[in-house]
Amino acid sequence: MNSLYYKVLKVDSPEAVLNKFYDTLIDTNRGYNFFVDWDKVKRHVDRYKIEFNILNSLIGSKDFDSDLRKILTEYPQVLPSIPILLAIRGQKLKVVIEC
């Protein structure tokens, strides 16, 4: 068990990590809707579902950078969905091009 969570939290199982998480939550009178605008999330998912599925192909990629470059080259329409995934409020995203 070499998980960073196990080491930092000094626990030895996924259940213990979850229990530690719950034990450290602070009681509040705020519901989930206070923290997340679920209607907005659903609108974004509906709007970008094809782009998100294209980007899902990166999960488990052995060569993430190369695969991302290939996707952005072949499917440039995914670029506007990236700020949504990163929760960036502004719709402008600077792209750094390596020389």
Image (cartoon, grey):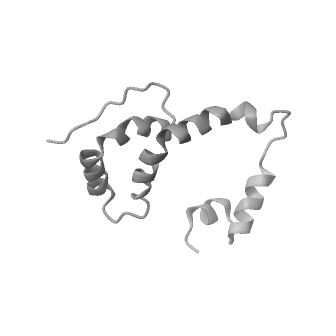
Farthest residue to the left: give it.
99
Residue 33 placement (x, y as % from top left): 74, 34
Residue at 44%, 60% in the rendered image: 59
Residue at 42%, 64% in the rendered image: 60
Image side of residue 95 versus residue 1, left or right = left
Whether residue 86 appears in this view of the structure is no
Residue at 40%, 52% in the rendered image: 54
Residue at 61%, 32% in the rendered image: 40
Please say if 3 is above or below 85: below
Q: Nearer the viewer, residue 61 or 50?
A: 50
Residue 28 placement (x, y as % from top left): 83, 36
Q: Quadrant of the C terminus?
A: top left
Q: Nearer the viewer, residue 5 or 79?
A: 79
Image side of residue 81 versus residue 1, left or right = left
Which of the 4 quarters of the picture holds residue 1? Answer: bottom right
Please say if 72 is above or below 90: below
Image side of residue 7 versus residue 30, left or right = left
Please say if 56 is above or below 40: below
Q: Nearer the viewer, residue 23 or 35?
A: 35
Image side of residue 53 versus residue 3, left or right = left
Farthest residue to the bottom: give it.
1
Whether residue 20 appears in this view of the structure is yes
Residue 15 placement (x, y as % from top left): 73, 67
Which of the 4 quarters of the picture holds residue 17? Answer: bottom right
